[in-house]
Image (tube, helix red, strand yellow):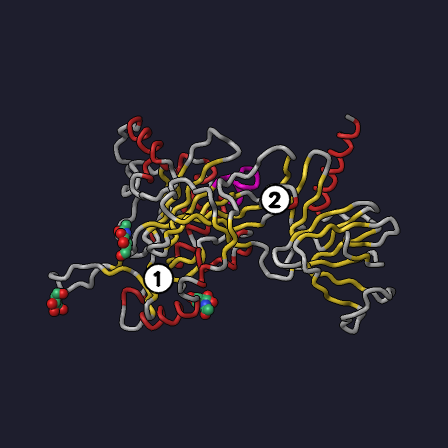
Amino acid sequence: MERLKLFEIDLIYFLLVIFTGFKVVSPCQLNVESPLPIFTKQFLTKKIVFKPHGASLQLQPGESITAYCNIGIMYKYNQASSNRYDYNFNGNGIRNQNLEVNTVEVICEANNQIGIKGKLSSSSNQFTIYCASPSTYDLYESKKALTNCENYANYAIGVPLQTAGIENDIKAGICYDLDRFELKFVNFVAYLNSDVAVFDNNKQTSELSIDLDKKISSLTNYFAFMSDSTFNESRDSFRIGNKLFNAFEFDLASLFQDEPLNTELKNFAYIFNIMWWRQLRQQNWRYFLDALRARTQASKYLVYMGTYGNATIPAAQGNCSSFQSEVVSVRKDKKAVSAPAYIWMYLKSLTHADEQEIVVIAHNSPYVMEPEHSEFCSVDLCDEVEWLKSSAFGNLRRLPTLGYTFCCRPEEVAKVIDYFPLPVDEIEISSLTKNNSSAEKV
Ligand SMILES: *[C@@H]1O[C@H](CO)[C@@H](O)[C@H](O)[C@H]1NC(C)=O
Ligand SMILES: *[C@@H]1O[C@H](CO)[C@@H](O)[C@H](O)[C@H]1NC(C)=O
Ligand SMILES: *[C@@H]1O[C@H](CO)[C@@H](O)[C@H](O)[C@H]1NC(C)=O
């Protein structure tokens, strides 16, 4: 028991050091540089996985830590005082070398020199490691399907840490329609302290119900995605002579508009890029994300996010016989990107099981005359959620010029969006028990 307690204290102390950058004088200093490796460290009953916050980690003699990069681990150290491994100098006595493995165990040896188990000893108490590739994460096919995604392709973005004896670190699940070549939804966990995960040795803790089955190369090998610059050029030339389109701003940008995922998943932006109405993205969706960010400091959410429908530009006046509205889109050669009518985020609390589940839905179009919620649900629930109601988002969300945004129960949304991530039987049951509330007046 005494032994166990000591290990728990070790763990807490270690977490304190990585969270606060709390300085200690240690015999060995492991420096880290961007692109950062992922580290794992074993305590008696728990293993933690983390990305370091500071620029260095302190190790005591005899202590070791495991580092992981997806392509290869690079290292450098000042070996002016060393006569071993003396090739590839850059002139300052510093050399950059690729260890050509994905996982290494870094140890602080008894003589206060940092070494890499089975690979080298550095004869220095300072040592720097970083990853050879800019992204730690790869794209995988998942054998397990996401909820209500059985008929589409299931992908996962993550790091295979199972070889290191712990669960894989999965950042996001993707439901993708390969026939139409479009994203149905993404699935991830929103939690501000997600840089550190503590795993119990015998407990499954991953909240995402997907796996890293088969690594696949970029989807850009198979499909042509529109690039940022092509979108900009085509958009800007379409503006000329199109007054209604020219009256507003649209951008090609990722569904992930917040850190850390925006940066961590940047390599896969082509999957997540959508045509955003800029006002929504920079105003009401921003305020919503700010409120969510504050909330996720203490609370963890399982999140599903996607789009729905087509934003349209009303037909120009003057020709009553052609009353066809036009889809808001940007085309170039055979590629086309069109603006979705709505962007939605479905939030399920993982911290409080009894918390009401909601779907936050935003109008991604400046062309809707009187935006409201009735296409999806009878009652707008946002004001029933205290952390949304009391935020800037709560005050501004109904202003059409900032992107009208509202909240619905998932069961109601699932009746409109057929690929909504709710099990089909749940939708049937809830429609029987649904009370007949009359439409709420906004
Ligand atoms: C495209 O345009 C947006 C502004 O509309 C700008 O922020 C972005 O940097 C541009 N991208 C490229 C590649 O030019
Ligand atoms: C949006 O447009 C696509 C392609 O034209 C069409 O297949 C789809 O049904 C439309 N979505 C809605 C909700 O009308
Ligand atoms: C009105 O629309 C019809 C059908 O699209 C077209 O044939 C006609 O030329 C249009 N008239 C004007 C004045 O633009």
Badge 2 crowding class, 10 Å Cα cut-off, few under 14, some 14 to 19, many 20 or more, is: few
Residue 344 located left or right of residue 323:
right
Residue 121 located left or right of residue 293:
right
Q: Quick one: 61 or 369, which is closer to the camera?
A: 61
**Eye-nearest disc, 1 or 2:** 2
Residue 260 screen position, x and y as percent: 56, 51
Quarter of the image where the C terminus is located: top left
Residue 225 located left or right of residue 51:
left
Q: Is residue 212 above or below residue 97?
A: above
Q: Residue 315: which numbered mark, if any?
A: none
Question: Alpha-carbon distance for marks 1 and 2?
Answer: 38 Å
Residue 368 is at least partly visible in this image? no
Residue 193 screen position, x and y as percent: 60, 43
Quarter of the image where the N terminus is located: top right
Residue 124 screen position, x and y as percent: 84, 58
Query: Residue beneath label 2, please?
Result: 162
Q: For the residue marked with disc 2, what is the amino acid?
A: Gln
Say whether disc 1 or disc 2 marks the residue closer to the N-terminus. 2
Quick one: SS at disc 2?
A: helix
- Image quadrant in which you'd find residue 194: top right
Query: Residue beneath label 1, please?
Result: 337
Q: Start and end of the magenta stretch?
A: 293-302
Residue under the image location 60 percent in, 33 percent down: 203
